[in-house]
Amino acid sequence: MAKYNILVVPSDRTGVGYFRSTKPHIYLEKMYPELFRVDIDYEAQLTKEHLQSYDLVHYHRTLGDYKDMEETLNTIEASGVPTIGDLDDYWDPGPNHPMHAMIVNTKLDEQIKNNVRLSRNIITTTPIFAKEMESITKGNVYVLPNSVDPEEKQFTSKPEKSERIRIGWLGGSSHLKDLELVSNISWKLSNDDLLSKTQMVLCGFDIRGTMTYIDERGKQQSRPIKPEETVWRKYEEFFTNGYKNISPAYLKFLKKWSNEDDSKFRDEPYRRVWTKPISTYATNYNLFDISLAPIVESKFNEMKSQLKVIEAGFHKKCLIAQDFGPYTIDLISARERGGKLNPKGNALLVESNRNHKKWYQHIKYLIENPNLITDLGEKLYEHVNANYHLKVTTEKRKQIYEDIIKKGV
C-alpha cells in the first residue's frame, strides 16, 4: 500500500502550532509509519509543482495572508489536493482580553471567521465549538481534542513533597477577570487561620513585555513595562491577600522581581513560580495538589478547550473548575447540593452564581478531607487517560484523514 503524504503548515514553532499541528503529526507518522509520511513546513510553497507530491494539506488557522485565503484554497483544490484546517480558539476574545482592541482594529476576528466559512474541512477541540463552526461553514467539521503524550517528560507526574496542601493555578497574562473569581481565597484562608496548613502557588509569572502610552506630543509610544505594572503583580496580590500572608523577608525577596533561588522561602503560604517554555511548563503541576480552573461566563471561554482538565488529570491533580463551557464536557462534581458526595464525581464544580463563596467552600472541605484530594486526582486521571491520550486522538485522526483523502476535493 502506498503511503499518504501529508503537508503540515503550523502557525508557529513553539506555541499552539506545536500542540495542534507539529506534535500530533509526528505522533501520527510514529503510530502509522506504513500509512503516513509527514512533512512539516512553516513556510510551505503552495505551488502546483510542490503540491502534486501530497495527498492532504493541514494548516492551523490560515495559509499565508488572510486576504489571499480563498485564492490559496482554490489553488490547492485545483491541484487535486484536499485541505483540512484547525482552529482551537474562538475568533472574538471579548473586551476583557488584552488583545481585544488589536484584534478588532485589524479585523482579525472577521478574517479568522471568514477562514472558517471558506474551509473545506476543519478540526476543532470540542463539540461546543464544532457546533458554532457548523453554523457558518458548509465544510466538514471534526472534533479532535487537545491530547497528551504521557511519555513526554513534562506530563510525567513527579509531585514535590510538602506538608502543606497546595492550591495552584497555571496560565498566562490574559486571565485577570478569571482570577478575580478566586481573589478572596487567600484572605479567607488567613481569616480561618489556615495559612500554616496551605500554600497558594502561582505558576507562569512573567514580567516581560511593553507598555503603550501617549507622549506629550500626542504620539503613541512604547516602553518596557515595569514589574509592578504587570498583571502578574495583580495576580500575586490575589494569591497573597495583598502580600499580607507572607513574611517581611519573603516580601522583600519578591519585590526584587528577579528569578533567583527561592528555596529558603519554600514553606511560605505563597509561592511564585516563574514562566517556563512550552516544552516544560506542565511540570508546574508537580508543585501543587489542587488545581484551580476559574473562567468567567463569556462566548470566548465557552468555546475554549478543556486543556486544564486534561493536564491536571494526567498529573493526577484534584481539580476545582467552573461549571461552564468546556468543563461541563468531562467533569462530574463530587459534591452535590447539601454536601452529599457523588461516587461518580471526578472533580469539584462551581456554579457562576456561587463564585463568591463556593471556591473557598470546596477548598476548605478538601483541607478537612485530604483523602478526597487523592481520590479525585486518580478518578480524573482514569478519565483523561482513556479519552485524551494522544494515541486515542491519533486513531481518530487516521480515520478522518483516510476518509478525506479517499473522498478527494
Image: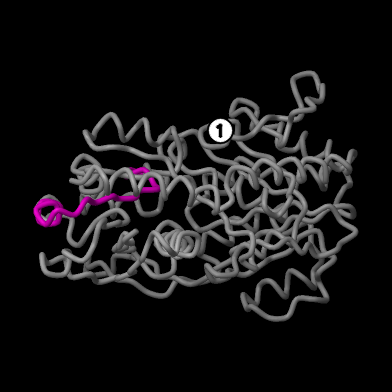
The N terminus sits in image quarter: bottom left
Left or right: 170, with 48 as reference point = right
Task: Classify mark 1: residues with Cα within 10 Å, few (<14), some (14-19) or many (20+).
Answer: some
Picture coordinates of residue 211 (x, y %)? 39, 67
Numbered disc total: 1
**Which residue lies most toward the bottom here?**
260
Picture coordinates of residue 124 (x, y %)? 39, 44
**Render colour scheme:** one colour
Check disc 1 and give the amino acid type: Ile
Q: Which residues are magenta?
A: 73-92
Left or right: 125, with 376 as reference point = left
Q: To which quarter of the image does residue 138 belong?
A: top left
Given residues 258 and 61, the one toward you in this image is 61
Given residues 325 and 190, the one toward you in this image is 325
Which residue: 73% across, 60% down?
157
Specify whether residue 89 is painted magenta.
yes
Which residue: 24% across, 42% down?
407
Q: To which quarter of the image does residue 256 belong?
A: bottom right
Specify whether residue 136 is painted magenta.
no
**Which residue lies most toward the front here?**
1
Picture coordinates of residue 177 (x, y %)? 52, 44
Which residue: 55% across, 70% down?
279
Q: Which element is circle 1 on? A: loop
Q: Which residue bears the numbered disc 1? A: 329
Given residues 222 and 4, the one toward you in this image is 4
Left or right: 351, with 34 as reference point = right
